[in-house]
């Protein structure tokens, strides 16, 4: 075996995948067709969930010093510049332990991710290499790559291949995977500039739903700004993509030309979703698996969430803690979320690109809504819901029901309209341990996390269960609700106290006192302390179970799709 995992593509998604797997101790080879980092920015924003993934990769603080501070809001404005609604992104710490939305200059972000490679002797980056073939075997997968400088080829044998090679993915083409086309396309002109003094410009991202010219504005980072202008049906690309055309478009924003254009490009966006995300030992992530319009700024973020989901599962399989059937849950969990983000982007795109006369109706409707005080307040502070899993690697027997009060609450519980803890993101507050040291919660966790509210989970488990949790790298915690109980016990269980009450508030919604959290911070299961042995047995059986679908490397011969480019 040449390496544990072969990664094709070293954009943000590929680089995050490599960092996560190398940090888990696995050997990784990354093959990138470019000879250096692409110096033209593309993505411009990500949220607190993605920053939490960077933290998982050991790069949270480095990224915090690289990106633009969190914006306070993301504005959606009418043709007359009136607020339709704001996506509230405030600059305080969110449930994931970081500010809500960050903007960034992509070449700097990619440089930081690749600098992270230098921490690992078992991670190698090969630039100017392109993939020409993938041969799947029962015991491994062989990737054929060509050095574009020497024109020589070599074969790399690995346990798994991850295709992170973008919208025109060679890996997807080699596997003969089709794309579902949602039929939502458009051409926009992107202009990135460097400006010494941007004090007169808004310091928060804005969407201008002007029928005459829908426009997006984003402060990308220190002295870097982006405008995106829709190319109208009556225009040609050559009309707008000129110095004179760009100067005219920017004249509504800048009264001078003391700026440097870093990038100007007409691009066409699409809404596409790969039919399959796994074939045997090979997986698709990021733009190779999905492409979406830019209006929700979710393209790169969705890909990085793919990387996090896949990386911990590949890690568990490589360490022997789980059967390969765990990898089947990757597509089940991530594909629906990507589809949701595509549909959200399309809805926002339709709203922003609405032409006359419907735009008049839209703006009038929002003006009327803003007259109603409660509705006005809501529109001023819309906030996207955090990610949530509804299917996949989740407990079905111990789901953690909400603690409902009052007649309406009891009715919801009786009819099953009672959102459970399973599949929810577990929050990350700053916690204090028994020695007084403060840290972000995830920094205390290795792998799974088992938390007991005002109880030590191990006191309800057998020695065999505790040994099993140690084998799968499960961290154990007692979480007192009073600082007076922040005292270390005799067991291996850590004691942590949440001073700002984030965990207390989250737990107050649920009846049970014990929660088991996956390595990607989603709740696997929740139960009463007395039911904990059964929850651990469920976890063990699901991790070790035989798959009802073909396991990695054992798919039928007709599905091996061993392909070499001619």
Image (cartoon, helix red, strand yellow):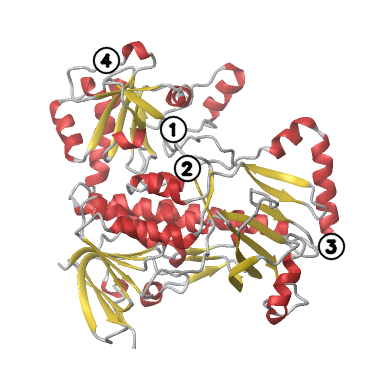
Between 463 and 398, the residue placed more toward the observer is 463
Q: Residue at x 78, y 52 (%)?
A: 78
**Which circle marks residue 388 in the picture?**
2
Q: Kindly identify which residue carries mark 4.
A: 487
Q: Earlier in the sequence, mark 4 or mark 3?
A: 3
Image location of residue 161, percent across then percent down: 29, 66
Q: Nearer the viewer, mark 4 or mark 3?
A: 4
Q: Nearer the viewer, mark 3 or mark 2?
A: 3
Mark 3 vs mark 2, CA separation in Å: 37 Å
Mark 1 vs mark 2, CA separation in Å: 10 Å
Is residue 89 rendered to the left or right of residue 512?
A: right
* Quadrant in the picture for residue 270: bottom right
Look at the numbered disc 2 and give the secondary structure of its residue. loop
Q: Residue furthest top?
A: 484
Image location of residue 334, percent across then percent down: 43, 53
Circle 2 Cα neighbour tier, 10 Å, few/some/many (<14 / 14–19 / ≥20) = some
Look at the numbered disc 1 and give the secondary structure of its residue. loop
**Which circle marks residue 421 in the picture?**
1
Labelled pair 4, 3 in contact (Cβ < 8 Å)? no
Q: Kindly identify which residue carries mark 3.
A: 356
Q: Nearer the viewer, mark 2 or mark 4?
A: 4
């Amino acid at each position: 075996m040449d390496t544990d995992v072969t990664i094709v593509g070293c954009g943000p998604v590929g680089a995050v995948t490599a960092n996560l797997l190398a940090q888990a101790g696995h050997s990784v080879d990354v093959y990138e067709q470019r000879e250096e980092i692409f110096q033209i920015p593309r993505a411009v924003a990500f949220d607190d969930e993605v920053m939490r993934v960077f933290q998982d990769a050991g790069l949270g603080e480095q990224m915090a010093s690289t990106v633009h501070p969190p914006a306070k809001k993301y504005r959606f404005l009418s043709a007359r510049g009136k607020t339709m609604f704001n996506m509230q992104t405030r600059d305080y710490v969110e449930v994931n332990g970081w500010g809500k939305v960050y903007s960034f200059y992509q070449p700097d972000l990619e440089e930081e991710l690749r600098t992270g490679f230098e921490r690992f002797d078992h991670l190698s980056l090969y630039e100017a290499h392109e993939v020409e073939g993938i041969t799947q075997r029962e015991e491994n997968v062989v990737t054929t790559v060509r050095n574009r400088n020497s024109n020589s080829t070599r074969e790399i044998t690995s346990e798994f291949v991850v295709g992170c090679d973008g919208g025109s993915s060679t890996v997807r083409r080699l596997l003969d995977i089709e794309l579902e086309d949602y039929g939502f396309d458009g051409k926009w002109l992107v202009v990135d500039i460097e400006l010494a003094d941007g004090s007169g410009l808004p310091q928060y991202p804005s969407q201008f739903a002007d029928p005459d010219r829908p426009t997006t504005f984003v402060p990308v980072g220190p002295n870097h700004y982006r405008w995106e202008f829709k190319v109208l049906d009556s225009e040609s690309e050559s009309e707008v993509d000129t110095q004179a055309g760009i100067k005219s478009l920017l004249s509504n924003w800048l009264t001078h030309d003391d700026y440097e254009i870093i990038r100007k490009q007409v691009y066409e966006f699409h809404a596409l979703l790969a039919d399959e995300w796994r074939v045997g030992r090979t997986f698709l992530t990021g733009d190779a698996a999905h492409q979406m319009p830019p209006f929700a700024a979710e393209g790169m973020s969705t890909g990085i969430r793919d990387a996090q989901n896949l990386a911990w599962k590949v890690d568990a399989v490589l360490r022997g803690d789980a059967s390969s059937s765990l990898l089947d849950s990757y597509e089940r969990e991530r594909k629906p979320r990507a589809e949701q983000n595509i549909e959200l982007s399309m809805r926002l795109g339709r709203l922003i690109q609405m032409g006359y006369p419907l735009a008049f109706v839209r703006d009038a409707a929002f003006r009327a809504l803003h007259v109603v005080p409660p509705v006005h307040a809501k529109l001023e502070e819309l906030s996207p819901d955090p990610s949530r899993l509804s299917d996949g690697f989740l407990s079905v027997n111990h789901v953690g029901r909400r603690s409902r009060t009052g007649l309406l609450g009891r009715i919801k519980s009786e009819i099953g309209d009672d959102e459970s803890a399973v599949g929810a993101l577990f929050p990350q507050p700053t916690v204090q341990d028994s020695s007084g040291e403060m840290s972000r919660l995830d920094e205390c966790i290795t792998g799974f996390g088992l938390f007991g509210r005002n109880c030590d989970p191990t006191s309800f488990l057998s020695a065999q269960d505790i040994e099993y949790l140690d084998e799968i790298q499960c961290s154990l915690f007692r979480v007192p609700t009073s600082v007076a109980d922040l005292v270390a016990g005799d067991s291996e269980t850590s004691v942590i106290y949440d001073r700002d009450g984030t965990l207390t508030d989250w737990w107050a919604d649920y009846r049970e006192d014990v929660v088991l959290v996956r390595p990607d911070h989603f709740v696997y299961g929740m139960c009463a302390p007395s039911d904990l042995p059964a929850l651990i047995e469920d976890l063990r059986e699901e991790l070790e179970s035989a798959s009802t679908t073909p396991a990695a490397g054992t798919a039928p011969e007709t599905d091996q799709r061993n392909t070499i480019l001619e």
